[in-house]
Structure formats: C-alpha cells, structure tokens
Image (tube, grey):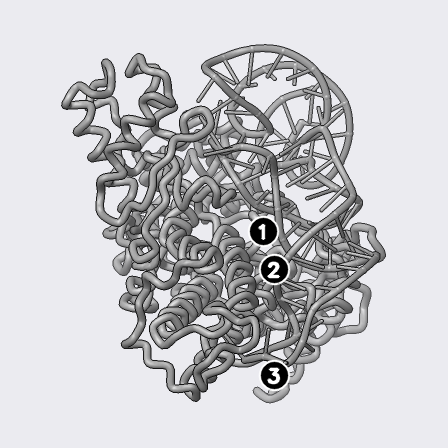
Amino acid sequence: MSPQALAELIYSTTRELAEAGRLGSLDADAVPPVENLAVMRPKDRAHGDWSSNLAMQLAKKAGMNPRQLGQSLADALAQADGIGRVDVAGPGFINITLDSASAAAVVDTVLDRGGDFGSNGHLEGRTLNLEFVSANPTGPIHIGGTRWAAVGDSMARILTANGAKVVREYYFNDHGAQIDRFARSLVAAAHGEPVPADGYKGAYIDEIAQAVIAQARGEGIDILSLPRVVDEDGAEGDSEQREAFRRRAVPMMFAEIQKSMKDFRVDFDVWFHENSLYESGQVARAIDELRAKGDIFEKDGATWFQSTKYGDDKDRVVIKSNGEAAYVAGDIAYYLNKRRRAKDPCDEAIYMLGADHHGYIGRMMAICAAFGDKPGVNMQILIGQMVNVLKDGKAVRMSKRAGNVVTIDDLVEAIGVDAARYSLARTDYNQSVDIDLDLLASHTNENPVYYVQYAYARSRNVDRNAAEAGIDKALADLALLDTQADNEVVGTLALYPGVVETAGDQKAPHRVAHYLEQLAGVYHRWYNQERVVPLNPEGGQAPGAGEDKNPGPSRAAARLKLNDAVQQVLANGLDLLGVQAPDRM
RNA sequence: GGGUUCGUAGCUCAGCGGAUAGAGCGUCUGUCUCCGGAACAGAAGGUCGAGGGUUCGAAUCCCUUCGAGCCCA
C-alpha cells in the first residue's frame, strides 16, 4: 500500500468515525483533505512503516487527548486489508506497520509502470515557459549560467513529469550596448590594439576576431580595411568595420553557445532573439498598448513606463532621450510575446535569474500586472544565488570582461557532463555554492553521482547474474520480502511519486538528487546483506547461511523483482536530472 | 542607508511544523570461501549564528539582533 493510498484510508476512516460520533465533539468536515494529510516515513523503523500526526492535530477540536483519539483511529485502521499493526506512540503518533505483501506491492507497480512510475498529471493542461541561462552572446557560458542549465533543464523534466507542457527557452540579448562593446573589443583586438576600458578581455576575443577576419577573407573581403571611426578619445565609434565584425561575430557566439548547451544535453525549444522584437515592431506595439492604458508618460525628452503604479520602486525609462530603446522595452514586448505567441503561448512565464539581477523583480512584476496578469502566477521569477569559485580555499572573482571565467566547457572537460550536471543540480539554487577548483580537478570520484550510478550499474549486474542462474520471476512471492533490509528498500521506493510531486510543486530539482542518494544507500545496504542469486544453488545450505544468503526460488525471484524495481526508479530519477544510467562503470 | 538571499558537523551541503537533526568528503576502527570494495558495518565530530515569541512540538513560523553575499542609493 502506497503512502497516498494510506492517506486516503486514514481520511475515510477518520470521517466515518467522526460521523458516527465516536471522536468526541469532532465534526467530520474538520478532517483535513487527503492532500493535506501527512503520511510520513519514520526514521526509526521501530515506529512502523508509516506514521500520521492526525490525532495530535485534531485532539483539540475533538476535545479528547491525542493518545486517546489516536487509539480510536488505530483500532479502526487495524481492521483494514493489508495493515499489519497499528500503534499509538509518543504524544499521539499513529504508527502503521503493513503486511509485507501489502508493502511490497509497490514493486509490481513500479515494474508495471516502468519509465512512467513517479509521473502524475496534476499540472495537466498548463503550459509553462521556462527561460534560463539566456547569457549574452558576447562570450562563453560561465559557471553561473551552467548552474542554470543543469537546474533549469532538470526542472523542465520534472514539471513535464508532473503533467505540464513545458517550453524551454533561451533569450539572446543581441541588441544594445553589450553587443556594441563586444564588437568594439573585437575590432581593437583585430588591430592588435588594447581593448577598450569597458570592453571584453580574454583569449576568446582574439580567437573570435581572427575567425571573423578569416570568414570575411573567405567572402573576398578585407575586413580590416573597411572604413573605421575612432573618436578623439580613442574610443571605437560606429562604423562599417565595426558593424561587419558584429554581424559575423554574434552568430559565431550563438553557434558556440548552442553547441555548449547541446553537449551539456540541454535542448532548448526556442532560441529567442531580442532583436526580433524590434525588427517585427512588437516593442513599439507593446508600448502603444501600455500607452492606451495610461501607463506611459513623457518626461525630460524620454518615454517612461509608470511602473510605480504596479508596485515598482521607481518609474522606468522605456525610450531614452536619444531615441534608443532601454532594456525594459524588450522585456515588456518579450513578456507579451510569451503569453500571446501563436505556438504554445504560456500560462506561466518562469524566469530564472542570477542573484545579481534580483533588482529586476519589481519592474518585471510591474510589467506583468500592467497587462492585467497576476504577478507570481503568470510571471514567476526564480533567483539563483551565486556560484563562488574557490582556488586555494579563497574566492576568485570571475568576470567575463576580465577574461578569467570558468566556462561550461572547462567544467565539462574537468569532470564530465554527468558529474557537472549532478553536482550543480543537487544543491538548492537558492543557496550559494562554493566550488573548489582544486577539488574538482583532483578528487572527481567524490561526487555523489557515482554513488547513485554505481547502484544502478550494480543492479544491472545482478540481472546478468540472475539470468545466468535461471531465476524465474514468475515464481516470485512478494510477501517474502519480509526482512528489515527488504522493508527499507520497499518503503523508499514508495516515496518516489511524492518526491516527484514535491520537486515539481517547489520547483526543486535537488530533492530528486537527494532522494536518489537515499535510495542508492538503502539498495547498497540491502545488496550487502542479502543475495538474489543463491550462494549454494545445488541445494543444501552454505555453512551458516540462512535464506538471507541462500534464498529459495520464490524468495530469490521476489528479490530479483525488488532489484529491478530499484533499478527502474534509479533510472527514472537520473533521467529527471539529465544524468545517464550506466550498465557498467 | 534601503532592498534581497542566506548563516546547520573540520569542509561541501540536505532537512523548512514532528519522535534521538542527516548525507558525502575528511579522520579513526573493522568487513571479501559470498551476485563488482566506486560498496558495507562501526567510532569520533553539533548550544542548527545569538536572544525573545507563537504551540502539544521550532533548525523549520514571527519579531529583535549580529555576521556574510548580491542589488540599489
């Protein structure tokens, strides 16, 4: 019996007793709904397989003491099928122990549903747009963006498993000042001049500059001789040459970023270009729409969005006095696009931003509200804390412009995609993380991903041995999964659907990772204590070996099914993290 | 100065209203006649930053305070 089924049983039993007036003055309608009934797995197995705190919650309303109320519930629950024993303990916990067959039924459920086990439909009918990474195409993806790649993609998989329609989206800021700076830096580098003070540095700038020169030469163009403007103060001005660099270099960065994401096994459904919002007139139309609502005003030669009307701490310039659009202008049009586009318009636009952008929340939510949507619902902003890179135990400040970044490709090269994705996704993104470069390079086996993957590989090996020994799953009697170790594994398997749901509701992929470590742990322990393939298959007992080491055919088959169920759940969970499940390691 | 996120084992991090606060790494001691030792069993290591409050019950919720990161002035 699953914890979900148990919750329903407790709910209906409690209502019946209350209606019969056997729970003091408790009104049946005061019983909390099933989804709010916590059925917990106690840490101490002496407290049963599952426990409920319902008696303590209801005691006051019932005018009974919690233990007394608990006992009434316990007596009724004990009558139900599949329940072995029910005790009341401590301040009023109801501790339930299942029959081994009932507990182990989850094994068949897992094997029947296969890759689908753990999925549910509770987000059915909702389209979620997940925008993450969205780094400017002015350089490679650094470690912070890499964290979002791992977390965002995993979150997308988890939300899909909860029944939502998910669109993974990457927003390229290919319009505006950053790109100009990037182009200026390239021109300077191409001429062997020092990059501008506010420009981008780093070896990749030289590489791209050279690649652009080569590409232009292939087109029969000597790009370095194109007209160029240098202002009196030495700054690279607006020129044909700069534009020629920009036009070639930006697509190169796109391609590089797309390749990095693909190599990291993140597949975006939409690569969105900020520029397209301007070229298609969507920015102008969005501003007009706000103007019609009376949220736009002119001041000091600039055009403003009156975002304070919707809770922002100050109004925002949308069009600067020099006629250029400000960054928010794109954000306004982009939000509308996400909500109203022809293909997969979203119900919820979810933005994943770094902590250095948390100051944007106010204006973003104002945009959402201005269009009559609900901030926090139609628009959700998740803020990820910083990833600190440590070297010799000290924090190293990274800056793309200074050119000392740890890139996604560096990380993958050092520890591989699986370890990188896993270690970045297993931490709550709302928590800052320290990554020690030396540790990364020297102790790669310390990553818990190997613990989980090894459990999977081990279970595959058990399959191979069992096949050779001719163990027949049809002979399995799940009631024979009755040892302490069996019980731990079975109970942990039953937790998985709840983990998927919680991870989805809280948008917390790291919960899946921690669950997998827990499951791998109980599996390794189980493997060490019991055998699937009998030690002495010729019959007769190996010296000192009971059924733990020398199971009969029904027990061996039951254990094999348990092994396979664990394997299935490990595979399902690893898939939610985008990490591979290896047959051998 | 304002906003925001966060202080849990030596280190990196879980737990976010339940029973004796957990894991990995590190340290120490053990376990192969046995499905793969990338494993298992055990030991040491904590006033959950501090102080109040809420309640049957607080690392978890609220207030105050100290410290840190980030953003804005």
Quarter occupied by residue A524: bottom right
Query: CB under 8 Å between callouts 2 and 1?
Result: yes
Towards the viewer: A323 or A306:
A306
Residue sitting at x 44%, y 58%: A483
Q: CA distance from mark 3 to mark 1?
A: 42 Å
**Residue most toward the left?**
A20
- Say which quadrant the C terminus of chain A sits in: bottom right
Amino acid on which the number 2 mark rests in the picture: Ser
Regarding mark 2 in the picture, which secondary structure is present there? helix
Q: Chain of mark 2?
A: A
- Front tag of 2 and 3: 2
Q: Chain of mark 1?
A: A
Mark count: 3
> From where the camera sits, is residue A189 visible?
yes
Residue indicated by mark 1: A427
Question: What number is the disc on residue A423?
Answer: 2
Question: What number is the disc on residue A562?
Answer: none
> From where the camera sits, is residue A268 visible?
no
Residue indicated by mark 3: A215
Specify which label sits upstream in the sequence, 2 or 3: 3
Towards the viewer: A211 or A17:
A17
Specify which label sits upstream in the sequence, 3 or 1: 3
Q: Are marks 2 and 1 on the same chain?
A: yes
Regarding mark 1 in the picture, which secondary structure is present there? loop
The crowding category of the residue bearing disc 2, from other C-alpha atoms within 10 Å (few below 14, some 14 to 19, many at least 20), is: some
Amino acid on which the number 1 mark rests in the picture: Thr
Instruction: Give left or right: position of A582 versus A396.
Output: left
Towards the viewer: A15 or A175:
A15
